[in-house]
Amino acid sequence: LAFFDPAAHPGRAVVERGLQVAKDPTRPALLANLGSGGVNYGSPIWTHLHFDLSPAPLRNARFRTVADIAALPLATASVDVVLCVGQVLNLVTGDLAIAEIGRVLREGGLSIIEFESTASLEFVGTPLSQAARTTVQTFFNHRPVTITAFRPEEVERVANAAGLSVISRTSFHIVSALLLRIGRRPEFAARFAVLDALFSLIPPLRLRGCKYVLTARKPS
């Protein structure tokens, strides 16, 4: 599951499309960005709450809190949208984090959850491809890290238990995952992320990228 994310993160467009779905021009909205790193994702209309374990990435964020996303300092049913993207879910106890997302999200609210997937083409033909969750070595911004990767069905199961209903699924780094499977270096594989738009049109490959994104609502 090793890959390198270029500065133009291909997941950004996925997140921004999700935020467009969440917009309600008739009311103010409160957005909680978990493990945000200070990134706003082009959402100036939101009251944007940034949460991270380290204060350094949040220094330019207006509303910021250093907190564990498994124990958010937020009231129950107080947030309109929750973002949990990047490798955040893979670096924490996923069940606890998703349960906390379900707790703080109001009825009708939207969550966007991104994670490293064991359904990735990188794992085709290996026992990891069927693992509900497993520890793997990967790379992030040139640095090796150890994370927990999840089978998408496992994350959906946990999300459903937290009171969330999945409304869309997508993935990216599809071509990169295939190149990694045949032994190409992460830096080389990441260059082909631009081809994901084409490969996502092929049904058997559409959800086989390294990165998987679930968009879910908390039913009213």
Image (cartoon, rainbow, N blue to C red):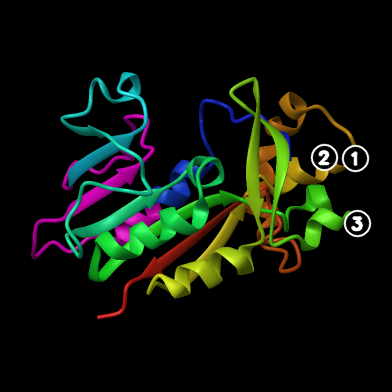
What residue is drawn where x is 85% and y is 43%? 181
Residue 93: x and y in percent read 51, 49
38 w.r.t. 165: above or below:
above
Residue 60: x and y in percent read 23, 22
What residue is drawn where x is 51% and y is 53%? 94
38 falls in the magenta region:
yes
Query: Alpha-carbon distance for marks 2 and 1?
Result: 5 Å
Q: Earlier in the sequence, mark 2 or mark 3?
A: 3
Tell me which amino acid carries mark 3.
Gly
Query: Alpha-carbon distance for marks 1 and 3?
Result: 12 Å
> In front here: 29 or 152?
152
On the image, which quarter does residue 194 sit in? top right
SS assignment at label 3: loop
Task: Say the numbered circle drawn on residue 220.
Answer: none
Q: Mark 3 sits on what residue?
A: 125
> In front here: 207 or 78?
78
> In front here: 166 or 135?
135
How crowded is the residue under tag 3: few (<14 C-alpha within 10 Å), some, or many (20+)? few
38 w.r.t. 105: above or below:
above
Res. 86 in view = no
What residue is drawn where x is 76% and y is 26%? 188
Task: Say the numbered circle drawn on residue 182.
Answer: 1
Tell me which amino acid carries mark 2.
Leu
Q: Mark 2 sits on what residue?
A: 179
* Span shown in magenta: 17-46
